Amino acid sequence: MAVPAMQFDAELVHPGEATGWTVFEAPGSAEVFGTGNPVRVVGTLDDVPVALTLLPSGHGFHFGPVKAATRRALGKAVGDRVSVRIEAAS
């Protein structure tokens, strides 16, 4: 059976409900991963490896938190775009 996966470009944003966080939105993620609950994923942001938990937005998709260390490695900040490649962690 194939591992659920997604690939898309996203903007780094501060979500309205948690402005101290930096996240990317994962549109269609609830359908891809088959749940509106948190989902552990692994993959890359641009070429930087990540392991994170997609969190439900309450609006039918998930958002992925991006740690400060990851943003530094990317050289990116809020408003910048990243190439996201993620799959369900085993």
Image (tube, helix red, strand yellow):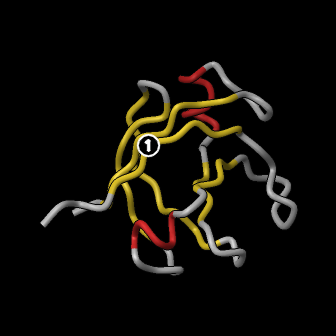
Q: Amino acid at mark 1?
A: Gln
Where is residue 42? Give x, y as percent: 35, 50
What is the quadrant of the N terminus in the image? bottom left
For the residue labelled by badge 1, is the local secondary structure a helix, a strand or a loop?
A: strand
Q: Is residue 28 left or right of residue 80?
A: left
Q: Residues within 10 Å of mark 1 (few under 14, many from 20)?
A: some
Where is residue 34? Give x, y as percent: 40, 77
Q: Is residue 43 left or right of residue 45?
A: left
Point 56% across, 23% down: residue: 74
Q: Nearer the viewer, residue 76 or 5?
A: 5
**Rendered view: 24 above or below 27:** above
What is the quadrant of the C terminus in the image? bottom left
**Rendered view: 63 above or below 73:** below
Kindly indicate the quadrant of the structure image that contains residue 33: bottom left
Where is residue 67? Give x, y as percent: 60, 43
Residue at the far left in the pictured view: 1
Q: How many marks?
A: 1
Q: Nearer the viewer, residue 75 or 58?
A: 58
Point 61% across, 25% down: residue: 72
**Rendered view: 48 above or below 35:** above
Q: Is residue 59 left or right of residue 87?
A: right
Q: Which residue is mark 1?
A: 7
Where is residue 52? Give x, y as percent: 46, 55
Point 41% across, 41% down: residue: 85
